[in-house]
Image (tube, rainbow, N blue to C red):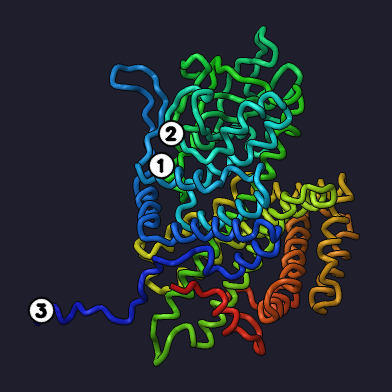
């Protein structure tokens, strides 16, 4: 009909759907191949490809939209007035969480190449909907803390590493799969967890206590168990708080409210009250921070992985759009200035992927040298990669023009999510100060990092010069706390540079070293210097349908 002629749709890209999120991410595929034993590589690739196809499917992407658009609701009482303290989720949330658990995203600790395959899967799955990754992360990270108590680990670890998602609230002993949350932060202390005031009073049964107090942030409140910190007679101690007790009664777990957050809307973050809440001690009294620190380290790596996933999705959307969109007589992707922007974004994404998968491989190795490497590299990577996520997401949205500001594009959800990982699990200053502590107390950590960086010595003069600058920074301890962010940024950049020089295509390594280490770059994205093969960098980042 003539009246419809004005509604002909032209010059719009097809939806980025029906593609394999894993296999079209060349940087990720190569990192997995690099860090996986050849004997299990085919198995790992096949597993990740299955998850990648699901992640790129129209159905699963729609679940992500639905979970975000229908945030959880708190139901404190049932119709008769009984206190129930339950959080209700949209069915899409449960479908996503079930698929994440089924994909092994809580089971890294017991499989060959478990951490590399799980890290790659986490990076892929984050691109669907980041909110459900929170309980997956907490559950995965609880395992090393529980292992401080062999009896608790024997009881809980098989449930946490299970591939079965059981959403019902019932005693964990009757479930074939369980999820964990965490509650450390209190309103008066924030990141200063030693200021916690939650009280733990011992009961007559050895190792059991009752807790009284308030947790300002409790992650994943519908989980089956929680690791929390409280003040026992011997000092700050770690405890396991089950949601449902062994006899089937509900533990005292009073959800006061759910946080109304900027992003991460699908995931419930709660304030909870403990008032005679039964708990089991994990580790020794007074050593709660030391007990839970391995859980914190694992969740910090997940923050970096999550940001790497968000950056990858933002770059994929931007490159995909520009590959189809025409303006000023040609494809946007072929315009020199847009190509510069896309290449700059792609470099940030690939560097994040390379570093996070290297950290996962260190977990799989488990040797003393690799543990020392993780002690310094995890907080440095968490600091830097999560800091880069927000500007990448915003610039990627701008590549879509006004379309990127519209909710249907998916970019606004990425933008709102992008600051989260920098704030959670210890914000930027906490990470920077943690690096300083490692430098001062654990000299082996610096040696391990320098050994890793040194594997690229002589391969690029800009990297070599940046390493010398890092040595200068480390040698000057006057006012070091005030310069901690500067130091950590340099450490993260030379780690990324070393990895890219050794493993990435020459055009990627050259562009990274010129801009990030050589200083030939402006303050905004799209200011890479001339003489670089940017077309190849962009093409490498393109997700092919």
Front disc: 3 or 1: 1
> Which residue, given by chain and number where applicable, does mark 2 sit on?
167
Asked whether residue 99 appears in the rendered view, the answer is yes
> Which residue, given by chain and number where applicable, does mark 3 sit on?
3
Q: Quadrant of the C terminus?
A: bottom left
Near-viewer residue (194 or 252)? 252
Q: CA distance from mark 3 to mark 2?
A: 51 Å
Specify whether 219 is left or right of 495.
left
334 lies above or below 322: below
Mark found first going from the N terminus, 1 or 2: 1
> Which residue, given by chain and number where applicable, does mark 1 sit on?
94
Tally of marks = 3
Residue 115: x and y, percent? 66, 50
Asked whether residue 426 appears in the rendered view, the answer is no
Near-viewer residue (119 or 289)? 119
Q: Residue at left 44%, top 36%?
A: 258
Near-viewer residue (81 or 501)? 501
Residue 108: x and y, percent? 63, 45
266 lies above or below 207: below
Assess whether mark 2 and mark 1 are in contact (beta carbons under 8 angstroms). Answer: yes
Q: CA distance from mark 1 to mark 2?
A: 8 Å
Mark found first going from the N terminus, 3 or 2: 3
């Amino acid at each position: 009909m003539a009246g419809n002629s004005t509604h002909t749709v032209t010059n719009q890209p097809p939806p980025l759907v029906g593609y394999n999120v894993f296999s079209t991410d060349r940087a990720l595929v190569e990192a997995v191949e690099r860090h996986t034993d050849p004997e299990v590589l085919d198995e790992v690739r096949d597993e990740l490809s299955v998850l990648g196809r699901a992640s790129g499917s129209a159905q699963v992407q729609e679940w992500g939209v639905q979970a975000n658009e229908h945030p959880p609701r708190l139901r404190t009482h049932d119709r008769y007035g009984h206190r129930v303290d339950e959080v209700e989720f949209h069915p899409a949330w449960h479908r996503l969480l079930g698929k994440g658990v089924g994909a092994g995203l809580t089971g890294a600790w017991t499989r060959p190449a478990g951490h590399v395959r799980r890290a790659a899967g986490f990076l892929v799955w984050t691109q669907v909907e980041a909110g459900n990754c929170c309980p997956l992360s907490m559950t995965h990270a609880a395992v090393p803390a529980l292992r401080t108590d062999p009896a608790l680990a024997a009881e809980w670890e098989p449930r946490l590493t299970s591939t079965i998602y059981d959403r019902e609230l019932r005693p964990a002993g009757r479930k074939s799969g369980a999820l964990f949350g965490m509650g450390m932060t209190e309103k008066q202390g924030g990141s200063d967890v030693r200021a916690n005031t939650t009280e733990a009073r011992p009961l007559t049964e050895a190792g059991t206590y009752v807790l009284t107090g308030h947790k300002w942030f409790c992650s994943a409140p519908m989980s089956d168990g929680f690791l929390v910190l409280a003040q026992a007679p011997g000092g700050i101690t770690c405890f396991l708080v089950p949601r449902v007790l062994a006899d089937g009664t509900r533990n005292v777990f009073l959800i006061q409210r759910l946080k109304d957050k900027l992003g991460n809307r699908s995931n419930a973050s709660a304030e909870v009250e403990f008032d005679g809440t039964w708990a089991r001690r994990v580790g020794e009294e007074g050593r709660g921070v030391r007990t839970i620190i391995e859980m914190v380290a694992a969740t910090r790596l997940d923050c970096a992985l999550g940001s790497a996933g968000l950056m990858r999705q933002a770059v994929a959307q931007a490159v995909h759009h520009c590959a189809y969109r025409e303006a000023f007589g040609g494809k946007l992707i072929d315009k020199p200035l847009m190509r510069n922007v896309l290449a700059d974004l792609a470099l940030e994404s690939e560097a994040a992927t390379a570093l996070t998968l290297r950290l996962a491989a260190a977990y799989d190795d488990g040797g003393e040298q690799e543990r020392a490497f993780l002690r310094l590299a995890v907080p440095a990577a968490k600091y830097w990669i999560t800091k880069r996520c927000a500007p990448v997401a915003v610039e990627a949205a701008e590549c879509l023009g006004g379309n990127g500001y519209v909710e249907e594009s998916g970019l606004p959800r990425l933008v709102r999510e992008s600051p989260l990982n920098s704030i959670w699990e210890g914000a930027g200053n906490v990470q920077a100060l943690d690096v300083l502590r490692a430098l001062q107390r654990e000299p082996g950590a610096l040696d391990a990092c320098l050994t890793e960086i040194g594997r690229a010595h002589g391969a690029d003069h800009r990297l070599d010069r940046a390493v010398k600058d890092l040595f200068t920074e480390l040698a000057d301890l006057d006012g070091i706390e005030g310069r901690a962010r500067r130091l950590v940024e340099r450490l993260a950049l030379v780690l990324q540079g070393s990895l890219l020089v050794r493993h990435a295509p020459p055009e990627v390594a050259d562009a990274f070293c010129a801009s990030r280490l050589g200083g030939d770059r402006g303050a905004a994205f799209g200011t890479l210097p001339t003489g670089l093969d940017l077309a190849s960098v962009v093409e490498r980042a393109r997700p092919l349908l």
